[in-house]
Amino acid sequence: MERSPELSVGRIPIVDVEPSLEQGRWPARAVVGEAVPITATIFREGHDSEGATVVVTDPEGKRHTLPMPQQNWGLSLYEAIFLPTKEGMHSFRVEAWSDPVGTWIHAAEVKIHAGVDVHLMLDEGVDVLTRARDTVRRGAAARESLTEAIAALKNGALAPEKRLAEALSDQVRHTLAKAPLREWVTASAEYPLLIQREKALVSAWYEIFPRSEGAKLNKKTGEWTSGTFATAAKRLPAIADMGFDVVYLTPIHPIGSTHRKGRNNSLEAAPGDPGSPYAIGSEEGGHDATHPDLGTMRSFKNFVKRARELHLEVALDIALNASPNHPWLKEHPEWFTTRLDGTIAYAENPPKKYQDIYPFNFENDPEGAYRAWRNIFQLWIDAGVTLFRIDNPHTKPLTFWERLLADIADAHPDVIFLAEAFTRPAMMHTLAKIGFHQSYTYFTWRQTPEEMGEYLKELAGESSFYMRPNFWPTTHDILTPDMQRGGAPYWKMRAALAATGSPSYGIYAGYEFVESVPRPGVEEQIDNEKYEYKPRDWSKADEFGIVSLLRTLNELRSDHVSLRRLRGLTVHRTTNPNVLCFTRHVPANESPKGREDTVIVVASFDPHSVNDAIVTLDMSSIGKQDDDPIPVVDAVTGAKYTWGREFFVRLDPSQTLVHVATVRL
Amino acid sequence: MERSPELSVGRIPIVDVEPSLEQGRWPARAVVGEAVPITATIFREGHDSEGATVVVTDPEGKRHTLPMPQQNWGLSLYEAIFLPTKEGMHSFRVEAWSDPVGTWIHAAEVKIHAGVDVHLMLDEGVDVLTRARDTVRRGAAARESLTEAIAALKNGALAPEKRLAEALSDQVRHTLAKAPLREWVTASAEYPLLIQREKALVSAWYEIFPRSEGAKLNKKTGEWTSGTFATAAKRLPAIADMGFDVVYLTPIHPIGSTHRKGRNNSLEAAPGDPGSPYAIGSEEGGHDATHPDLGTMRSFKNFVKRARELHLEVALDIALNASPNHPWLKEHPEWFTTRLDGTIAYAENPPKKYQDIYPFNFENDPEGAYRAWRNIFQLWIDAGVTLFRIDNPHTKPLTFWERLLADIADAHPDVIFLAEAFTRPAMMHTLAKIGFHQSYTYFTWRQTPEEMGEYLKELAGESSFYMRPNFWPTTHDILTPDMQRGGAPYWKMRAALAATGSPSYGIYAGYEFVESVPRPGVEEQIDNEKYEYKPRDWSKADEFGIVSLLRTLNELRSDHVSLRRLRGLTVHRTTNPNVLCFTRHVPANESPKGREDTVIVVASFDPHSVNDAIVTLDMSSIGKQDDDPIPVVDAVTGAKYTWGREFFVRLDPSQTLVHVATVRL
């Protein structure tokens, strides 16, 4: 922060520069191709004109200048759009300046028209345009254009109004706007802005338990054979074919045997129960090893290679805790907490005890513990993992994450971290600020159109400059009551909401089959895959049409830039409280391809009845006039409609609970 | 800002510290006795307990520690109340820390009750209380209390639950809360907080044109004799008697004769017209001189002295512009703008010209111009002026004001500046941020209960840490349409709103007479005092009861701390859109006298009919339970009522349009 402490206001004041996280305590974030609106409140004394410019410094130290026009006079609001094209740490500052040409044009137009001070105004015009020509670097054509304007002002053969009009031709105005004469240039502080690859914002995840893919039950012996990296790899073409771009594996490490959990989270495992992959570590190794049933590290790398061939990246689930059999318990007891009675502390939520899990201690040997974890992550990065899903990051010190994420970003800026922190907002927001690229959200628990609309608006707002949501309609841990009861039409609607409500979303394997039976008393599936093998008959995967829907949604996401952005969302009024309508819109100047894009989503949250609604669109939010027709194609049903500011929808669960309508240009 | 750039989150994260103006770009402000809520979002990993403390550093560098309890678990919000007792630049930081005692108490209470890990919990208690006793500085009694607690935990003769209960006596808990065992203490940045004298926030202004007070018309010759400082001083006892504490004089300098304005702003002054006191400067001097008709500098000082005897401070109106006859036009043409035709630029709003006023130029000779103005202000400070009302500060560079106000605050921290900037919000807010103590506001233009309620809430909100409103129901320049038509009951209501809606307010002389006739076509009085003498017959001043009302209001303001604060305002629901209800409340812990204070204002904005309303109070906002009775005395009528959460009011213009009800304790 470079500021003069004595005269902090500046000659042309600039306040409230955004995006800024506590004035640069952390960088704001965006991805390549994602338009960043840079705004500031700028004003000046008296009646003279001011102007503003944004100067962006890219990672190579090269400066780029962006025009920053006034957006709102009453609020003194100026805005520039920065469309990043390269990754890395950028910074920007806002410059405000006195605009003597603008001041003169305003006065000259009024006064010459009114016949007041006519010759003085013409003379002042010659003076100010001469300065604009001679003191600002510009090309020969631009100089020539200003020379002609000056000559026009001096041309005694013309009437004064004509002289002014000639001098202020469109070409001259363009020349002046492009390279303005700037006086008393005042700079804001310099604000950091980190640009990451597009996948940090935009991704479609598909979650599998690799041991389930290809697992086989011997019906005679009742014994299971685990799926392997090799058998799981056979599932990859189908995942890629649905259009997902990330395959996410639950933990793949050896699983402890002491206090192993049995089916349905029972305290006693039966013989042959594979245990929870989150109880990490056995004699066969810890976080640096693969489970022997899944295969070797070489076989894991083959899995990654196969995924890559199919344009899938591999996300690995890392849970920073240990089973009682984790090798580190013996090798590094200092990385755990020893209690007064000499025992090692297991996880607990008093009076409940979780004796199958030992939390790490990051304080006894901070440097040693840090190095150990840094090495674990490096090992998997070296094996080809490019995304990590971090289990419960909010139970570890944030200083640890901030250091780890900065370290890894330095060496591997392409590696992406997803935080699974279902907790209070302050923690979730701060994990994002300190470096997590993506966050699980409250999406599943927003169960009415009103709640969902509010939440979508919140996520598309101020926090969009650092927190990127990843929407999951279910996970292996979460099956909300509405999903238990809604049936296939409702599951389809929630999948469509997830895929269009957020640039990143995820689907947990088995969604295709509407696996909606809960274990009594808890909001998760019965026969939870965490504790057993769960092979599925993929030949019947599309019986509910969900495979087709997911393929359609992923195609839409890839064709429509508005679905790949977080900002540009508007929630619209509907006459039915069961019906939500929101739009995603990217105007042409915020699109890398220079083409505007709009998608309209209308969803009924009621799976049991037909719901009618009249929707009233805020037309300006999608770049339309109030009387414009809106021709759309519904990607879900293929139907074409011509909508307008007001339109009627009927959402019938026997047909569809959701329209995802793309606007035809 | 002291922060480690590498690990900016800190071991126990602290974010969103308030009050902060752009993270310390400018200091937040408060006055002696005004409670400052210091808030932060604080949380930590996992389930262990955290605590927080505020450390305030006073102007002598002495540190004061304030407890900062959690206010809202879901929002991770912590708050401390700082009640300043001395003026000067303070700073504060927030400290967050791990709370091992809190963590242990929570676990021990649950687990010992459940019979889990009983002896381990007792042993851990001995350990943590011993650390709390031996590593935190505390007195002998506190140490002894902890030693007894430790002994209780070890007392094998008692049942475990009894041992715990004895160890955690109220006295022990108090000892621990007062001086907690703090681990992993994490500090926020240091935030500046400027404490000023109470008058910077709380003041009651009374505006006069001194030349009118004692002015005499010779009916034979038609000639006027101007009032003088000496005759104006005769008005001071009445002003003081009404309870005002600031007497504000419009400019007192020599007035130009060239292009002098005549009555009702006519372009031609008639012989004997005194001219506008805002057209400053003549052969008799400029801003450093007194108008000869008013008297000498010595006579001005006598006026100040007389005011002081009556506990009135003197505010002087400074307009930084010149009449064509100002001595500086000749002596320092570089302090004005010379145009291309060699003329000096007068004020204009093209195509309108104001040839009686020349704006100053602060750019040609910034240092010279600055010194000249600094000297002018010093001259009047030396003459006893302690407040300045600055005319149109928004037409001068903000860098000028920031430097001037800092300079004067250094030498004369008691001097107060009121900004008359009726302009866009960004400018008004920034003038406040850079040092103006008080601001004129949009109060006069908020003409419905809804608008007024919103505005009061806005002013009592975030901006209350730097912008202090001064409410004027009229000024010599402003007579809004509602005031033209409302009559005495309405004028009384607006005076009561001004006096209770803001800690600072002002009344322009003549308000007592309901001088409500406008000059046709403009929103100001006919026969505007700016252009003529306007003596009033003060013997009839209370014919509308306004003198008595003002006296009552000023007494209330002096008796009720809640009326002297900006925060603590709540707007309540009423059933009638013509009726506004708001309360002012200071809880005991935010009051210098340790006594809570509540005032309820109910006003009808309809001067022409009787309005009934049912008011529903947000009881928690005034520290009450929903079923508490609220005994009140209405200061306007003297009536006593017992109100409650819901109460009925009838506001009849023939009686009163406003209740100002104080709550009896």
Image (cartoon, coloured by chain):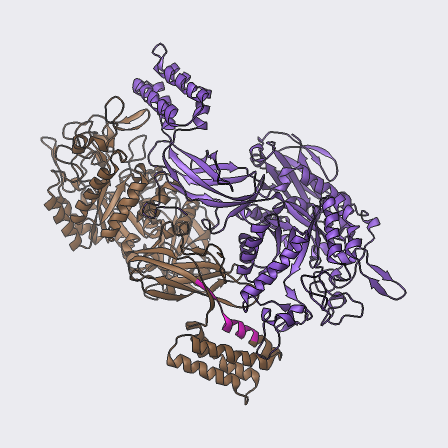
Chain colours: A brown, B purple
Q: Is residue B92 left or right of residue A200?
A: right
Residue B645's image quarter?
top right
In front here: A261 or A136? A136
Which residue lies at the image location 60% right of the left edge and 37% below the top edge? B585
Q: Which residues are magenta?
A: A95-107
Q: Nearer the viewer, residue B338 or A178?
A: B338
The answer to whether residue A531 shows anywhere in this view is yes
Left or right: where A576 falls relative to A640 = right
Pick the residue in front: A619 or B240: B240
Of helix, strand and loop, which mostly describes the magenta segment? helix
Indicate the position of residue B82 as horizontal and vertical percent values: 52, 37
Above or below, A266 against A472 in this view is: above
Q: x%, y% of residue B76?
A: 42, 38
- Indicate the quadrant containing the C terminus of chain B: top left, top right, bottom left or bottom right: top right
Q: Confirm whether the magenta stretch covers residue A106.
A: yes
Rendered location of residue A407, percent (x, y):
25, 48
